[in-house]
Image (cartoon, helix red, strand yellow):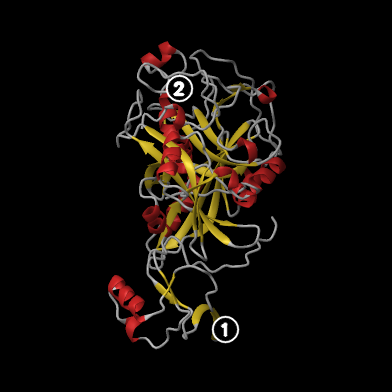
Amino acid sequence: MPDLNITEPRIYYGELDNDFILVNTDAEEFDYPKGDTNVTTTYEGAGGLQIGSLPRKLAFTLRFGTLKMLLSDSLTSESRILFRRAIQERVQTIAPFLSYDRDPYLVIRDDGSLVWIWDAYTTSTHFPYSQPRANGVNYIRNSIKVVVDAYNGDVTFYQIDPDDAIATTLGKVYPGLFVPGDQLPEDLRRHLRYPEDLFSIQANVLAAYHMTDPQVFYTKEDLWEIPTELYANDEVPVVPYYVIMALPGEAKEEFLLLQPFVPLQKKNMASWLAARMDGDHYGELVVFDFPKDKLVFGTAQIEARISNDPDISAQLTLWNQSGSQVIRGNLLVIPIEDSVIYVEPVYLQSTENPIPQLTRVIVAYADRVVMEPTLTMALEAVFEDGGAPTTPPTTQPPGGTTTTTLSEPTTTTTATVTTTLATTTTTLPGAPCLLTPPAWPPWPSSTIRRPNKRSRRAIGRSTAGRSPSSDGCWRP
């Protein structure tokens, strides 16, 4: 991984900074500690407003309810006041008519500066022939990417979807608010990620609308649901997670957002949904189905196998004594070539000073479950015979869904898995019928692709020629 070149690490506008500050005063600004002294800095950005004259001081005194600006002798003619520094408040004050994702993310630009990128949605409760969700919304589209400069506080709204009628109308109501998406700088475009909130909505709707056979859909015989896992000591739904990995049939790793599925009221794995983000693949949603005539363990089953392993259970019970607490982290389901591997971190923290520390890594594959101090050691232990168990060919079962089909048995070696997982990273969150055409990203011209005879269904890219079902929902 190349070194990260950050030329301006100071963040004046972020997720937590909600108090006003005064800059360019006679008082030195604390930057960071260095040995027995403190390093100071001077703000050189263009953010905020100049305090200037006495009337301005009076106005800011009334606005913020403090006499500091009237009584302080540190203010100069160049002093500025920075407020609305929390990006959530800052952006929503400018455009309160948009909905926003729960998770803004920080990006390093090519010049080393830091900016925040925040996904914004246009929504409606009045889209014709579209079934509403619990909150009444029946239309959602991720048409806007908001960019906030972490140093100056500059806010830019990029409309990356020119076909969104609501965003286009809002742009005409507020001229100059939205910048065309083709003007988004390339160094920012490379960092765009698929928004998790929209992905979760689509995954919940796909749990029913993956069924394309009318009879199967009517009888609801192939419904999916989000699986559960043990996080700490609680059973919680598996939330989507970001990973860097190669899709089955692809030669190059890419940045993905994954969500596994299980059959309704069952524990075995049914499929997983991936959102692609790299290059021209941005916005593609791909479904990989598991064969119904083969048992592929789901997350709850793997959690049970971990808990039932006598060696692992004994060690976790020993650590989980008074004075310490064992935290089992998020269980990651990671496809590797034609296989699936499960990885779960184990943290240990003191009850007095709760700072979690990574203590062990659990890896499960096929009928093996191991726990070792590092991921590399766990992989070596789970594949100690030099290779993974082979996977026999499977057939296409009835039911109207596409399944994973392997043309021949495959073997996954320890070196291959170690190399692949070494590049795998993840962002774990804490954790409308929207199937109108705008609810999905653009659809590819081919909805079925079979690279290396491994079948997968792509949902995304063009809605041309498609129509909603009788209840107004669009089916993938």
Q: How far apart are the alpha carbons under marks 2 and 1?
A: 62 Å
Amino acid type at image mark 2 = Arg
Residue beneath disc 2: 475
**Observer-nearest of 30 and 398:** 30
- Look at 43% across and 60% down and name the residue there: 15
In the image, residue 226 lies at what x, y percent? 42, 34
Q: Quarter of the image containing the N terminus? A: bottom right
Residue 9 shown left or right of residue 26 in the figure: right
Q: Secondary structure at mark 2?
A: loop
Amino acid type at image mark 1 = Gly
Q: Secondary structure at mark 1?
A: loop
In the image, residue 90 lies at what x, y percent? 40, 58
Q: Which mark is residue 35?
A: 1
Residue 177 shown left or right of residue 457 in the figure: left
> Quadrant of residue 21 in the image?
bottom left
Most extreme residue toward the top, as rendered? 215
- Look at 35% across and 23% down and name the residue there: 129
Q: Earlier in the sequence, mark 2 or mark 1?
A: 1
**Observer-nearest of 329 and 18:** 18
In the image, residue 270 lies at what x, y percent? 49, 27
